[in-house]
Image (cartoon, grey):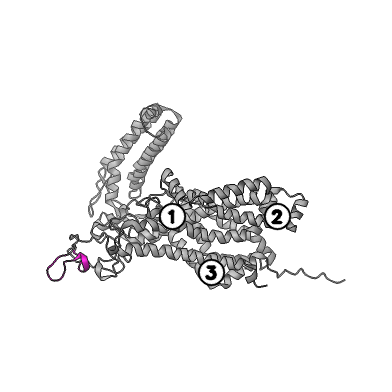
Amino acid sequence: MTEPAPAVVSAGRDYWDIVLAEMRKRASVRVSSVLLVLLYAVAIYAPFLAGDRPLYVSGTDAAGYRRAQNTLRFAAADLRELVAGGPEAQAARPDAPPFPQALADQRDAVAQRVSTLRTQVDGEAAALLDDLTVALERSESQARRGATGPAVAAADEVVELAKRVKAELSPAEPGQPAEPGRTVELRPFRRYPALEAIGRGELYLMLLWALVLLFPLWNRAVDRWLLHGDREELRRARRWKAAAVVLLPLLPLPLWPFGAESATQTSPYKAGLTQGDVVASRAIMPPIAFGLAEINDAEFLRPPTWSRSSRISAEGFYEDAARSVAAGGGETHVVPAMPVTVRHGEPATNSALRHPLGTDSLGRDMLARMVWGGRVSLSVGLVSTAFLVLIGIVIGALAGYFGGWTDLLLSRMIEIFQCFPVFFLILIVVAFLGPSITNIMVVLGVTRWTGVARLVRGEFLRLREQDFVVAAEALGARQRRTIFRHILPNAMGPVLVTATFSVATGILTESALSFLGFGVQLPIPSWGSLLIESRSPEHWWIQIFPGLMIFVTVVLYNLLGEGVRDALDPRLKSA
């Protein structure tokens, strides 16, 4: 009896296999894709690349300990007053938050100070802080239940324990032994300040982008070891790979212990390390050791430190160009002498690496602000494009599939939106809603969807008479399945091309809005808002470098869009 022949895996390529192969052939697509992925990586991992928060610090922080110790009793007294007054007293206060929120805020204020103390003490001192934590939790729990008497009693215990902390847990002087009942010897702590400032949303994006950056490695391993190179299995696995990239970063979020701090707040660690309040055995600063909002009055509008005009003497005078005393005895505009303070982890005063892109009008490092500004500019382009693509697909699909009066009404609506100048419409809407990142994203999305809608409508009009659509309808497929499962995937080619160009347009529009003062508000930077720090040709670096980043990003997106367009052109595909 003849054995059955083994199944042969089809070596044929589907539509998207051909498209991806055509895209990989184009050097412009490869280069632009890699550079865009790296640009987004710089923006997403900005807290680890530029900031005044150390990546790691080990040592003692006597100043921070004393601040927490001195303010603990006041926070405890505020908690006791809130619990004693109850919801009625809180409701009677104008503009006061609701009682549950106020109670949570006061509880966090006490707990944060206790946590700061707890990291540097142990033994009996730690036991005292543990007792305070237990009383704090009991007071909050009773207050939420409405048991005012037990809640006040627990709050009184918190106040008494806070007074004991003040009297018994003062830090001993360096080199002096601790006095039992009066002082304690601080033990070294280990902290990750940059990591502790990361919120759950930022963590999700960081993990997601790590999967994107490592895609060539894990995708090849999955294809080879799990799917064994079977082409049909590879095709079916595409959606599962995409789902894994989106969903896997969600798993650690519920366990993330840290909360988000505003990046515009200056970290106390760097100042403490500089002044000696934090005695560190080891401290690792980010590569760009300047905070997003860190101000240095002695270096306002300082040129890039690799240029001769940026050199500053030990007395604080500029040594060259228009800011120095002119040769020959006459004087030009002389900047007052202000010696530069070199803080912990920063390059020397005249090092070429100190401010390679110069500083702004408040002495903030332009390179650090550009790294953080990329978060706003790049995210506005992506999110606004997602909005406009979603709106355009829905409206265009409905108009193209149903036709008749539906098509007539939706087409007229599209034409009405196209009658208005988009940029001025955006200005009007932002002026009424107020400038913010969210408003800009939404406004850009809801005002620029008409092009996508017309493209999708045209594709649906072309595809709805095709045999595969007629067959699906004849087999009883629901309209929703026919639209989104059969027609839409075949209409996505032109939409993808438009989307890549729309991201570039969104970045340009956001930059223009920020330049006019209707965009993201300072101190949060975007590449567009950085341009308005100074409009004087003397401060050329403020216009050149942010403008160059906008130009490069837009060019990369345009190159990517052209590559996608060419790959989708049937006349340019190889068999």
Left or right: 13 with respect to 311?
right
Q: Taken as a whole, is the magenta stretch helix, strand or loop?
A: loop
Q: Quadrant of the C terminus?
A: bottom right
Q: Quadrant of the N terminus?
A: bottom right
Point 41% across, 47% down: residue: 435
Q: Which residues are magenta?
A: 317-331
Residue placed under numbered mark 2 in the picture: 464
Left or right: 562 with respect to 227?
left
**Residue count near mark 1 (Cα–Cα under 10 Å), binned few <14, some 14–19, many ≥20:** many
**Residue count near mark 3 (Cα–Cα under 10 Å), binned few <14, some 14–19, many ≥20:** many
Left or right: 572 with respect to 97?
right
Q: Position of residue 417 (x, y in %)?
A: 53, 49
Residue 276's quadrant in the figure? bottom left
Q: CA distance from mark 1 to mark 2?
A: 37 Å
Between disc 3 and disc 1, whose residue precedes? 3
Point 12% across, 68% down: residue: 329
Residue placed under numbered mark 1 in the picture: 510
Most distant residue in the front direction: 419
Q: Position of residue 239 (x, y in %)?
A: 63, 58
Q: CA distance from mark 3 to mark 2?
A: 32 Å
Left or right: 239 with respect to 325?
right
Between disc 1 and disc 2, whose residue precedes? 2
Between disc 3 and disc 2, whose residue precedes? 3
Q: Amino acid at mark 2?
A: Arg
Q: Amino acid at mark 1?
A: Glu
